[in-house]
């Protein structure tokens, strides 16, 4: 496994999925879109690296628990950031974070199964 390539692929897929999801949720301000993308550039590699480490060292069950914990933390952290920096206020920033992260997690998992 080429870890840097895996990290880039996961980040690119996350950015595409979350951009589409944000547009579906009517996020239109260019700065808001940019901020959503920048937040993911920071959080996604942390989550993917943690996932890879957990799977390599402990197997699927621990990886799954780790993903759940990491995603909860990411939704909270991103929600806090969105609350501070986004102009978008059609829905709560924590709900926005949850919806964006859920979309990228589930669509990403579906794609990985194909």
Image (cartoon, rainbow, N blue to C red):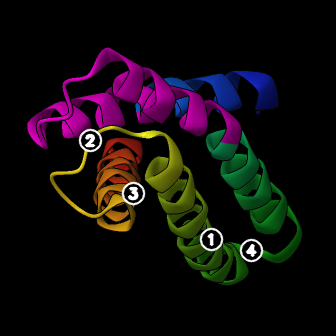
Label 4 or label 1, whichever lies nearer to me, is 1
Tell me the distance, in whole angstroms, between the alpha carbons under discs 3 and 4: 28 Å
Q: Is residue 61 magenta?
A: no
Which type of secondary structure does the marked residue at label 3 adopt? helix
Label 2 or label 4, whichever lies nearer to me, is 2
Which type of secondary structure does the marked residue at label 4 adopt? loop
The residue at which mark 4 appears reads as 59
Front-most of 65 and 1?
A: 65
Q: Are marks 3 and 4 in contact (CB under 8 Å)?
A: no
Q: Quadrant of residue 16?
A: top left
- Residue 98 placement, left or right of 64: left
The residue at which mark 3 appears reads as 97
- Does 82 appear above or below 34? below
Which type of secondary structure does the marked residue at label 1 adopt? helix
- The segment highlighted magenta reads 14-42
Label 2 or label 3, whichever lies nearer to me, is 2
Tell me the distance, in whole angstroms, between the alpha carbons under discs 1 and 3: 11 Å
In the image, residue 84 lies at what x, y percent?
A: 52, 49
In the image, residue 64 lies at what x, y percent?
A: 59, 76
The residue at which mark 2 appears reads as 88
Q: Residue at x 61, y 61 (%)?
A: 77
Label 3 or label 4, whichever lies nearer to me, is 3
């Amino acid at each position: 496994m080429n870890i840097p390539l895996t990290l880039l692929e996961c980040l690119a897929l996350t950015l595409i999925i979350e951009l589409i999801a944000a547009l579906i949720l009517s996020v239109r301000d260019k700065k808001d879109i940019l901020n959503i993308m920048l937040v993911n550039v920071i959080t996604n590699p942390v989550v993917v690296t943690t996932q890879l480490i957990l799977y390599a060292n402990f197997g699927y069950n621990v990886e799954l628990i780790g993903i759940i914990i990491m995603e909860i933390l990411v939704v909270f952290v991103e929600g806090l950031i969105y609350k501070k920096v986004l102009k978008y206020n059609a829905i709560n920033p924590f709900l926005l974070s949850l919806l964006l992260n859920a979309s990228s997690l589930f669509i990403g998992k579906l794609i990985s199964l194909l």
